[in-house]
Amino acid sequence: MRSVIAGICGGDAVASAELLAALGTEQRRGWRALPDPLPAVAALETHARNAVPEGADLQSVLVLAVCGSGTVQVLGAIAGCEPERVSESPLGGLAQLRGGRFRLLDAALRTHVLAAASAQERLRAHQLLAAVLGSAGDEDAALWHRARGAVVGDPGLVEPLLALACAALREGDAERAWSRATEAAEHARPGTPAHAGALLLSGWAALAGGWITDAADRFEQALRVDPGHRGGAAAFVLGHVVRHGTAPAPDPRISAEAIGRGCGFAALLNAPFGAPCSDREPGLRRLEAAPDAGCALDEGDAIRRVTAALRAGLDGDPDAGIRALAGPGANEDAELPLGLHASAPLLRARRAVADVLLNSWAGRIGTAHAILCASAAELPVALPFGGVAAALCRRLELAVEGRVGPLSHELAAGIPWTQDSDGFVDRAIGAYLRGCSDEAAVHMTLWTDRGRPSERVGLPGLDEVGPLGAPVAPEPPEARLARTLRERVRSARESSWRADLDAVGAESRGIRSPFERARVEALLGSTAAAHGDRGRGVRHLRAAFSLFEESGALAWRGMVGRRLRALGERPQRSSADDGAAQGAAAPSSLEVCRAIWEPILTARELDVALLMAEGRTNKEIALALHVSVRTVEVHGGRIFAKVDVRTRHELTVLAHRIDQHL
């Protein structure tokens, strides 16, 4: 939600914070759609005063904000001039003109203008646009503005608005579908089947967008208006399960068939729920025997296709699963069980989380982290598979960054169901990566003593320390093999440890996942060094360093680098570094920088500084940290002053040479 608000505010961090504070709790968590218009905030008002051109008519600016985009002829009508002279008008400077069309560029200005306008002013803007767009031949847009500009309800608009909502759902535009279906419900006569149908469709639009509270509310309203409406009872059951995690209480309006269909589709989405299904957090394989959702599904279907891809990953071929997700096959226009389409954001989020899981199983930790960050910016990834994305994000952030970051906290806040915490494992991993093995072992022991609560399927955990032989969640064969090999290393006999380690090393060579193989190599190296065999330890640790580099698990790589330095070795350059310029530095330098700069930089400045030192652009840093480009620029200026450099180049050189002077 933070990235959505940042886009609405044009990247203004202050305005984003003010707007988030003005929203309701469920809106901030993504469970309800954003209000239209959004609340007015002071930072956007200040921006708008500076952004509106001198001489511009404020009502025309409002009409432009309501319209947002369209043809140059429409912009000319709004500006009161010929299309050829639009660029010379005051409004021309606010719009991007290209190919005979325009688009309002300033998102923050649009947000404030809509928020600050009175209801009467917005009404007049819609009425004007209805006339202008009707004359231009854009009947669908004219219909929308005619509905929004109507003073009283018009039942004749209901069916055309619902047709627009259905088209938007097929295109995967949940926001547009929600607004059209919601407007249709406003125009329908209360208590009629048409009213129930509009409420039901708005519920499906809300579910498609991940706004689960809105979906549950609309399904309940539709059931109350017309209990016999086709699909209404099953939709109500689904909405209740997805929002609350349990089936609804017995209700005479809801048949056993409707309960079966609603719970069946919830099982297909893999939402956690209790009765009538006993497993509160169903595993991925449970989808194979999901209750009937009311229609036939095959392996090419968007839901079964994801399930089949994950099954391939758990069976040992995550790359086959990734290819299945990426390749052609699913019909994006197909209507799936009950009322969702394959292009719905909720189902796209499901595919994205599956893609992240498969890449993590394949050992591409950095890739999995990047996919999750990008997907979370635009899709409700906190909801699919019982909210597994939040736990997965924590493990990936720990593996890449060495600590739990803001994205995982945001995803955890977006999970509507009560969950047991697996924080002991997260704290154990963080401690282990900092070199505090004893502390990590304590956390793992406490977690085991509590019965290993809430361990998710196929997530990277920690078995290098702590109790041996504890049961684990379902995992791919390579992860299971690597875990077994690490347990054998830890159980190596004092009398034959060299032979035991040699046998483990030989078996580990068949592991394709660079991350899993690296963890085995790292433990082999540490164990050999602890037994006094420095040469063997260095060889295994160098292999682990290279493999962690390949996987993108930079925090694990940093841990191995510190162990190599403790043995008097400098971590070798990666293959990418070998062909780089002579001034390129060994990867471990940034880990040294983190320790040196932590006392003088804030946590966020340290994040920005290290990413700059890696060569990331401001845009890439903004995407990685979920902030605006302007915020990155501000942090950059403060960093330069604190570490006494003038340019990014000087910062990079300093970062990569700093450990040479320790």
Image (spheres, helix red, strand yellow):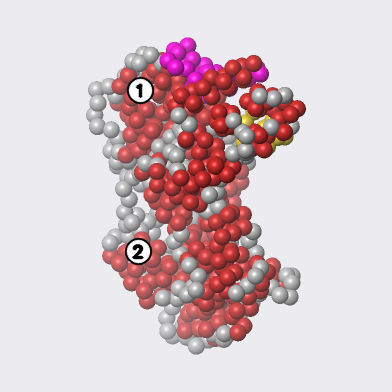
- The image position of residue 640, as x and y in percent, is 59, 69
Q: Number of labelled discs?
A: 2
The label on residue 353 is none
In this picture, residue 651 sits left or right of residue 5: right
Q: Quadrant of the C terminus?
A: bottom right
Q: Amino acid at mark 2?
A: Phe
**Comes first in the chain, label 2 or label 1:** 1
List x then y, in percent, for residue 623: 57, 53
Query: What is the quadrant of residue 633 in the picture?
Result: bottom right
Q: Is residue 437 above or below residue 374?
A: below
Instruction: Check the image and name the residue furthest to the top.
Output: 156
Which residue bears the numbered disc 2?
424
Residue 160: in magenta span: yes
Q: Amino acid at mark 1?
A: Ala
- Residue 445: % across, % down: 32, 69
State the extent of the magenta-drawn residues as a range: 136-165
Front position in the image: 615 or 287: 615
Per the image, label 2 sits on a secondary structure element best described as helix
Q: CA distance from mark 2 to mark 1?
A: 44 Å
Which residue is painted at 62% across and 38% down in the image?
Answer: 54
With 242 as the anchor, is 526 left or right in this view? right
Location of mark 1 (residue): 222
Q: Secondary structure at mark 1?
A: helix
Could you tell me residue 273's position as x and y percent? 33, 41
Q: Main secondary structure of the magenta part?
A: helix
